[in-house]
């Protein structure tokens, strides 16, 4: 990773475990200084201790990303440094249900993290990068951004915002010297997925996802992680014809059917 263009500091939102931790380890190995933000203090401290043991300079902040004051809290630990790389990796979903029946705080949290969070952090740090004429932004996305899925209305809708927002932001920032990438991932073996009881042994390792994001930051606006079947699924569910049938046939399956769906997706990629 080009420290001159994207350094000296990287801010990783959702940076305590899974893909975020993989980003942090790779960036630390390349000489980046790190600010890691996530909700859980324990995993943050453990990762920070590991990286400091390897010689990295690390700041950590435990913050609830769904709260309206989160940017102000993060700015309190970054306003005195030069953040050249923003990675917004937060946004997993742990609650399914009908939109009209779910508690408002559940859906509002999803929207706050995936929509307002990405927009607000991109505005603040992107403006600073544009002023310097260099930098990069990676916004975490999902294959679910191509298809509205029943019981995941707020989540899939917010991921669609992220993808379209990233494309527009890429177009605006490229002439200013700032790279923008929507990192579109599929089924990934993160601790969050494991806690939900998902069959993570069938999923893509977080290290693969992070590596592809860093290697393709200049290849925006969208990069679909190369998990077998990801590109094929995106093409299949993104058609404009007969959306009613597409939504019915390809909605995200319940958790107990994830293994079968993962195998089916990999079969899509087989010749």
Image: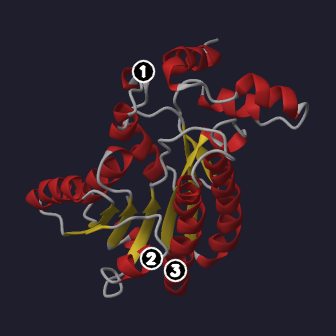
Mark earlier in primary sequence (3, 1): 3
State the CA–CA distance, disc 3 to disc 2.
Answer: 9 Å
Residue at 36% x, 71% y: name it. 7
Q: Is residue 22 left or right of residue 241?
A: left
Residue at 36% x, 78% y: name it. 73
Q: Is residue 269 left or right of residue 64?
A: right
Disc 3: CA contacts within 10 A as few (<14), some (14-19) or many (>=20): few
Mark earlier in primary sequence (3, 2): 2
> Can residue 2 be seen at all in this image of the molecule?
no
Which sits in the foreground, 223 or 259? 259
For discs 2 and 1, the disc positioned in front in the rendered view: 2
Which sits in the foreground, 107 or 200? 107
Q: Quadrant of the N terminus?
A: bottom left
Q: Is residue 153 left or right of residue 124?
A: right
Q: Label 3 belongs to which residue?
A: 124
Q: Are marks 3 and 2 in contact (CB under 8 Å)?
A: yes
Q: Quadrant of residue 18?
A: top left
Disc 1 secondary structure class:
helix
Q: Quadrant of residue 116?
A: bottom right
Q: Which label number is shown at residue 202?
A: 1
Mark earlier in primary sequence (2, 1): 2
Q: Which label number is shown at residue 71?
A: 2
């Amino acid at each position: 990773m080009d420290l001159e263009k994207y350094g000296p500091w990287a801010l990783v939102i959702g940076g305590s475990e899974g893909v975020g931790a993989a980003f942090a380890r790779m960036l630390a190995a390349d000489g980046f200084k790190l600010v890691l933000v996530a909700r859980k203090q324990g995993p943050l401290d453990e990762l920070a201790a590991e990286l400091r043991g390897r010689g990295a300079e690390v700041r950590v902040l435990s913050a609830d990303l769904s709260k309206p004051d989160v940017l102000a809290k993060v700015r309190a630990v970054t306003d005195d440094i030069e953040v050249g790389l923003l990675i917004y990796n937060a946004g997993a979903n742990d609650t399914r249900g009908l939109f009209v029946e779910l508690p408002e705080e559940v859906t509002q949290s999803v929207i706050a993290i995936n929509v307002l969070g990405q927009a607000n952090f991109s505005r603040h740090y992107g403006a600073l990068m544009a002023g310097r004429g260099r930098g990069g932004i990676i916004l975490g996305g999902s294959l679910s951004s191509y298809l509205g899925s029943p019981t995941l209305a707020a989540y899939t809708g917010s991921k669609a915002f992220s993808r379209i927002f990233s494309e527009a932001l890429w177009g605006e920032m490229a002439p200013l010297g700032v790279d923008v990438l929507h990192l579109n991932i599929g089924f990934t073996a993160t601790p969050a997925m494991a806690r939900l009881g998902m069959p993570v042994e069938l999923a893509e390792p977080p290290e693969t996802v992070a590596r592809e994001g860093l290697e393709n930051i200049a290849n925006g606006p969208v990069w679909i992680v190369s998990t077998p079947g990801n590109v094929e699924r995106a093409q299949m569910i993104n058609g404009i014809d007969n959306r009613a049938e597409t939504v019915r046939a390809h909605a995200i399956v319940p958790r107990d059917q994830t293994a079968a769906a993962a195998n089916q997706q990999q079969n899509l990629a087989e010749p």
